[in-house]
Amino acid sequence: MNRNNEIMTVKGYYSDNSLKPIDQEQPFSDCVVPRHYGMPITPCAFLEMLYRFRDSPTAGQDPFKNVWWVEFSKASIFRILAQEECDYIRFYFAIPDAEKDEASLLLHGVDHDHKTIKAEILLDVSEKMNQQTAAHPGEKLNESTILNSLASPAPPTEEKGNGGFGFPINGEKNVKSMSDFLESAGPFAEMDIHNFTKEFFAYADKQF
């Protein structure tokens, strides 16, 4: 039997009342193919993806040239909303893959005062990233060292499909394409709003 969920490590209480890591199923994929509609990412990955998007327009790239929509599962959204102080979700544009210039979305929690949750922790992470890069130029970032040095855990952050690694599956793309839709069939430019909407929804449902 195919399993719907994937195993993730969360913290929970043991019988001796100690708080320790526990492996549990977390829903974010279906039982047919391993589609991922949102995946947890480290704060380092979150900051790099956000920073990479800042650079893409200045490099003369068009990160939206092949993007029409992005899907997140409710599990991905609930992992953000589950924070005690979280009242909103902020969606950031980002470039997940350093080898590509295609945009995606990041999810991050915001409190009732519209303030970024645990912004001070993310700023600490970014400072440590700078320090490590300056001390070891050209070397791969050691995220474990940074995360283990934090005074408290970083806030949960999510991205659509963790940058698309492992995609496409059976020809499916991670972030759904505007150009693929427009090139799929029919003279969309000549359609009225009703027929365009009808074709668009049919395409979106088919590509889910």
Image: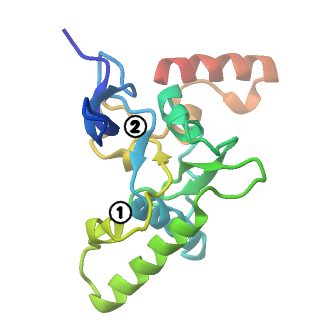
Instruction: Write the residue at 40% across / 28% down.
Output: 28
Q: Is residue 36 above or below residue 20?
A: above
For disc 1, the neighbor class at 10 Å (few under 14, some 14 to 19, many from 20) is few
Between 23 and 97, the residue placed more toward the observer is 23
Looking at the picture, tell me which residue is in the foreground, 73 or 118: 118
| Count of numbered marks | 2
**90 is higher (above) or lower (below) than 62:** above
Look at the image and tell me in which quarter the N terminus lies: top left
Amino acid type of the residue that numbered disc 2 sits on in the rendered structure: Lys
**Image point 56% across, 32% down: which residue?**
181
The disc labelled 1 sits on which kind of residue? Answer: Glu
Circle 2 residue: 173
Left or right placement of residue 147 versus residue 204 in this view: left
Q: Position of residue 122 (x, y in %)?
A: 52, 66
The residue to which callout 1 is attached is: 99
Q: Position of residue 55 (x, y in %)?
A: 54, 73
Q: Is residue 71 visible?
A: no
Q: Secondary structure at mark 1?
A: loop
Residue 93 rendering spot, x and y as whole percentages: 59, 55
